[in-house]
Amino acid sequence: MTRTARPALGTFIFFAIAFALAIYFTFAAVQGDYGLFRRAEIDAEARDLAAQLAIVQADVAQMENLTKRLSDDYLDLDLLDEQARKMLGVLRSDEIVIR
């Protein structure tokens, strides 16, 4: 009698489960909440936010400069004259307006 060797069903199930788990963890490492693609998105968002922060910091520095120049401790007469003319719409008689 010849008996053909067949792989055991338990061995097949073990390797099928191991393969399924390997596929799942590989997918989670690439696509998951903490995966490679999410990391790339977070890095890109961080670069965008850093650029926005630089713009906002420049605006704040400019506003601080203008505020300082109009303060009581340091009065810039040219800036005061410019702001008063802008707000009141006043011109001197020897000025020409170009629009």
Image (cartoon, grey):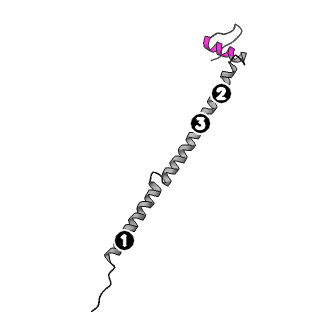
Disc 3 versus disc 1: distance between alpha carbons?
53 Å
**Residue lying farthest to the left in this orientation:** 1
Q: Position of residue 34 (x, y in %)?
A: 48, 52
> Which quadrant of the figure contains the N terminus?
bottom left
Query: Judging from the image, what secondary structure is the residue with disc 2 in?
Result: helix
Mark 1 to mark 2 CA distance (whole Å): 67 Å
Q: Quadrant of residue 11?
A: bottom left
Task: Inspect the image, locate mark 3, and give the three-letter code of the amino acid beneath it.
Answer: Leu
Note whether 84 is above or below 25 in the view shown. above
Q: Residue at x 72, y 15 (%)?
A: 77
Crowding at label 3, few (<14), some or many (≥20) Cα neighbours within 10 Å?
Answer: few
Kind of residue indicated by mark 2:
Gln
Q: Earlier in the sequence, mark 3 or mark 1?
A: 1
On the image, numbered disc 1 is attached to which residue?
A: 14
Residue range corresponding to the magenta coloring: 80-99
Above or below: residue 1 compared with residue 9: below
Q: Quadrant of the C terminus?
A: top right
The disc at residue 62 is 2
Of callouts 1 and 2, the N-terminal one: 1
Q: Is residue 55 magenta?
A: no
Number of on-image labels = 3
Q: Is residue 65 above or below residue 18?
A: above
Q: Which residue is mark 3?
A: 53
Labels 3 & 1 near each other (Cβ < 8 A): no
Left or right: residue 2 versus residue 66 is: left
| Residue at 68% across, 25% down | 65
Question: Are the residues tagged 1 and 2 within 8 Å (C-beta)?
Answer: no
Measured as percent of width and height from the top left, residue 15 is found at: 38, 71
Question: Residue 62: where, in percent of width, then height?
Answer: 65, 27
Nearest-to-viewer mark from 1 and 2: 1
Q: Residue reaching furthest bottom?
A: 1
